[in-house]
Amino acid sequence: MPPVMFLAVVGVAGLAGYRLLSALARMGQAARRDEARIKRATAPVRDLGNLEWDETNGVYRPRQKRDN
Protein backbone atom coordinates (compact mmCIF):
# COMPACT_ATOMS: atom_id res chain seq x y z
CA MET A 1 0.00 0.00 0.00
CA PRO A 2 2.82 2.56 0.71
CA PRO A 3 4.12 2.37 -2.91
CA VAL A 4 0.64 3.24 -4.20
CA MET A 5 0.45 6.24 -1.85
CA PHE A 6 3.93 7.33 -2.94
CA LEU A 7 2.94 7.15 -6.62
CA ALA A 8 -0.24 9.13 -5.91
CA VAL A 9 1.72 11.88 -4.15
CA VAL A 10 4.30 11.98 -6.96
CA GLY A 11 1.51 12.16 -9.55
CA VAL A 12 -0.27 15.02 -7.78
CA ALA A 13 3.03 16.89 -7.32
CA GLY A 14 3.85 16.38 -11.01
CA LEU A 15 0.46 17.68 -12.09
CA ALA A 16 0.79 20.72 -9.83
CA GLY A 17 4.27 21.42 -11.20
CA TYR A 18 3.05 21.13 -14.79
CA ARG A 19 0.20 23.55 -14.16
CA LEU A 20 2.56 26.00 -12.44
CA LEU A 21 5.04 25.94 -15.32
CA SER A 22 2.24 26.36 -17.86
CA ALA A 23 0.89 29.38 -15.99
CA LEU A 24 4.37 30.92 -15.81
CA ALA A 25 4.86 30.41 -19.55
CA ARG A 26 1.55 32.12 -20.32
CA MET A 27 2.48 35.02 -18.05
CA GLY A 28 5.84 35.36 -19.83
CA GLN A 29 4.16 35.46 -23.23
CA ALA A 30 1.71 38.11 -22.04
CA ALA A 31 4.57 40.18 -20.63
CA ARG A 32 6.50 40.01 -23.91
CA ARG A 33 3.37 40.95 -25.86
CA ASP A 34 2.72 43.94 -23.55
CA GLU A 35 6.36 45.01 -23.76
CA ALA A 36 6.21 44.98 -27.57
CA ARG A 37 2.98 46.99 -27.50
CA ILE A 38 4.56 49.61 -25.22
CA LYS A 39 7.67 49.77 -27.38
CA ARG A 40 5.56 50.43 -30.49
CA ALA A 41 3.51 53.08 -28.68
CA THR A 42 6.59 54.95 -27.46
CA ALA A 43 8.61 54.72 -30.67
CA PRO A 44 10.38 57.95 -31.58
CA VAL A 45 8.44 60.18 -33.94
CA ARG A 46 10.11 61.22 -37.17
CA ASP A 47 10.23 64.93 -37.90
CA LEU A 48 8.83 65.32 -41.40
CA GLY A 49 9.37 69.06 -41.48
CA ASN A 50 6.73 71.27 -43.07
CA LEU A 51 3.75 69.47 -44.52
CA GLU A 52 1.52 70.41 -47.42
CA TRP A 53 -1.91 69.14 -48.40
CA ASP A 54 -1.96 66.65 -51.29
CA GLU A 55 -5.28 67.19 -53.06
CA THR A 56 -5.11 64.05 -55.19
CA ASN A 57 -4.68 61.64 -52.27
CA GLY A 58 -6.34 63.71 -49.56
CA VAL A 59 -3.43 63.50 -47.10
CA TYR A 60 -0.64 65.70 -45.80
CA ARG A 61 2.79 65.00 -47.31
CA PRO A 62 6.24 66.43 -46.57
CA ARG A 63 6.81 69.62 -48.55
CA GLN A 64 8.93 69.03 -51.65
CA LYS A 65 12.15 71.03 -51.88
CA ARG A 66 11.94 73.38 -54.84
CA ASP A 67 14.96 74.72 -56.69
CA ASN A 68 14.19 78.43 -57.23
Image: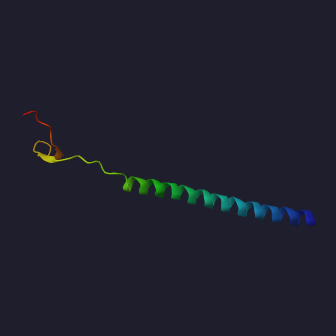
Name the foreground residue: 64 vs 29: 64
Q: Looking at this rendering, what residue extends furthest in the left direction?
A: 68
Displayed quadrant of residue 38: bottom left
Q: Looking at this rendering, what residue extends furthest in the top direction?
A: 67
> Would residue 34 be found to the left or right of residue 9 on screen?
left
Q: How is the image coloured?
A: rainbow
| Residue 63: % across, % down | 15, 42
Residue displayed at 42% across by 54% down: 39
Q: Is residue 1 visible?
A: no
Quarter of the image that includes the N terminus: bottom right
Q: Is residue 49 above or below residue 14?
A: above
Residue displayed at 47% across by 58% down: 34
Figure label count: 0
> Would residue 25 be found to the left or right of residue 68 on screen?
right
| Residue 37: % across, % down | 42, 55
Displayed quadrant of residue 7: bottom right
Name the foreground residue: 29 vs 11: 29
| Residue 41: % across, % down | 37, 56
Name the foreground residue: 18 vs 60: 60
| Residue 28: % across, % down | 57, 57
Displayed quadrant of residue 22: bottom right
Q: Is residue 12 visible?
A: yes
Quarter of the image that includes the C terminus: top left
Residue displayed at 57% across by 60% down: 27
Residue displayed at 77% across by 63% down: 13
Q: Looking at this rendering, what residue extends furthest in the front direction?
A: 68
> Would residue 31 be found to the left or right of residue 49 on screen?
right
